[in-house]
Structures are given as structure tokens and as C-alpha cells.
Image (cartoon, rainbow, N blue to C red):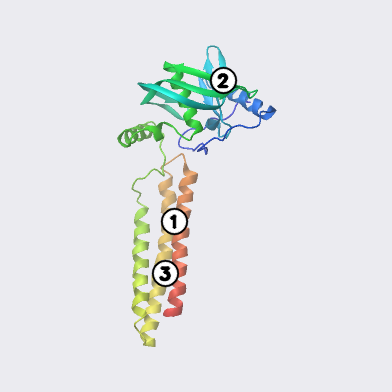
Amino acid sequence: MIREIITYPAQTGVEYAPDVRVFDDELYSFIDDLKETAEANSLDGLAGAQVGSYYNVVVVKQGDEFLELINPRVLKKKGTIRSNESSSYFPNVSVDLDRYESISLVYEDRNGESHSLKAEGDFSILLQRKIDYLFGANFLTKLKDDEKEKFEALLASSGVSCPTTPRSFSRDYFVKVGNFIMIAMILLVGVALFISDEATLSDMWSYQLYFSYAVLSINILYLFYSYYENKKYSICTNCFNMSIYGVVAISLVRLTLLMIVSYFLIG
């Protein structure tokens, strides 16, 4: 079965692939799926994490056949080489990375038998790239800050960018205004602690209500404007929308708690 390969900015969801302990037909079927998927996409290798699986498995082309590596572990690294690499995770872009020129590793086959392997040159780089995915690593995680910024700019120019990458949004101004109003509400509560005149407290409660209506209105405007701003992006919109809901939820919780305190001290 050909599986769907995850591409940026979607996350593989795998930060660390635990070792395979059960060698059964389900594992064998998954390995065959990986090889079939790699063949269908003309890839030299594929890791389980690239299709969203926690299986600690990598398949790489060695000659005309695929080498199956289960629970691979790099034991020795030697030398450094600059490598220009591309990946199915970042389609249509490439990046220069420093890799080890040669590596020694151990792994298990589908029968649970242990093997050792020494790889050099291009084969070593291929193995390093695939094993990286098993530990939640990719090009972005391996680049330095300045290189990472350049690569993100390259992704954006290629039509691949993540809207949740830190940047300035116009919608952020709504959040700032709402926060300033709630700061004013907190100050009003503080002043009320030193006032005993009922008429003055009544007026302050009215102001507090007006402030709360303003915060509610700002959150509604923020929600609608965020969706408008979101239309600029055609990918990764689910996590973007969830961040919007989270901001609104936090704001409303704060406003609710503030109004409860205000009611008992001022209302």
C-alpha cells in the first residue's frame, strides 16, 4: 500500500521513535508499504516518521534493492562534508548542510537479527538524513539561526510557508488594545478598594461594564479579522485557527474572572 508522505509545514508528530520490540506481520507489512511508497515517489529512502508512523524503521536504496533497517543506531562518526540536499518533506527546495563523511551503525533486520554497517559518501548522507527523522529532526532543526532564516525565506518564495512562524500580524493590534482595556479595569478595581461612597462605586461599576463590552467587541472583531487575515495562507490553517481560538478563550477567561472580582468589590 502506498502511504501519504508528510510535507512541510505539517508535522510528522514523531519526536522520538521508540525501538521496535515485536517483529510480526504488521511490521513486515509496514516495511513493504515504505518500500512501495518510496518506489512510487522515486525516492532513495524513506523513514517511518515521514509517513507519520512511530515504527523505528528506515528503508534505503542499495543498488537495485532496498536495505531494511530496524532500530538503527549510529555508533561512530568520522569527518565532515558539505552536502547539498533535498527532501520530500520540503518539496522543490534544497539546502547545504554539514554531514559526517562516514558513519558506523548497528541495526536489526525484519527477523530481529543484529547487523553492523559502515557507510561513506552519498550512502552515509542518505542514512543520516533518514535516521534524523526518527529523532524528530529535519533541515530546519539542523540549521543555524541565520541559515534557518534564509531557508524559511526560500520556502516562502517557493510557496511553502507556515503562518504560525513568528511574524507580525495586524490582528495582534486587537489583542494589545484588549489588554490595555483590561489593565484599566484592574486599576479601577484597585482604586475601588479605597472608596466607600456607594454612588461613586455605582458609577465605577458602570464604567467596568462598558469596559467589558468593549473587550467583548474587540474579541469578536479579532475573530473575524483573523479569519480574513488567514485567507492569505493556503496551508497549515488548522493550527493557525486553533491559535486564534486559544487567544480568544484566554481573553474571555481573564475577562470573566475580572468581572467576578469587580462584582464583589464594586457592583
Residue for point 39% across, 72% down: 210
Badge 1 or badge 3: first in the primary sequence: 3
In the rendered image, which residue does mark 3 sit on? Answer: 212
Q: Is residue 171 above or below residue 130?
A: below
Q: Please give left or right for residue 184 compared with residue 28 in the image.
A: left
Amino acid type assigned to the residue bearing label 1 in the image:
Val
Number of callouts in the render? 3
In the rendered image, which residue does mark 1 sit on? Answer: 247
In whole angstroms, how far apart are the C-alphas of marks 1 and 3? Answer: 16 Å
For the question of whether residue 43 can be seen, the reply is: no
Q: In what quadrant of the picture does the N terminus appear? A: top right
Badge nearest the viewer, 2 or 3: 2
Q: Please give left or right for residue 244 compared with residue 150 in the image.
A: right
In whole angstroms, how far apart are the C-alphas of marks 2 and 3? Answer: 67 Å
In the rendered image, which residue does mark 2 sit on? Answer: 115
Badge 2 or badge 1: first in the primary sequence: 2
Residue for point 50% across, 45% down: 238
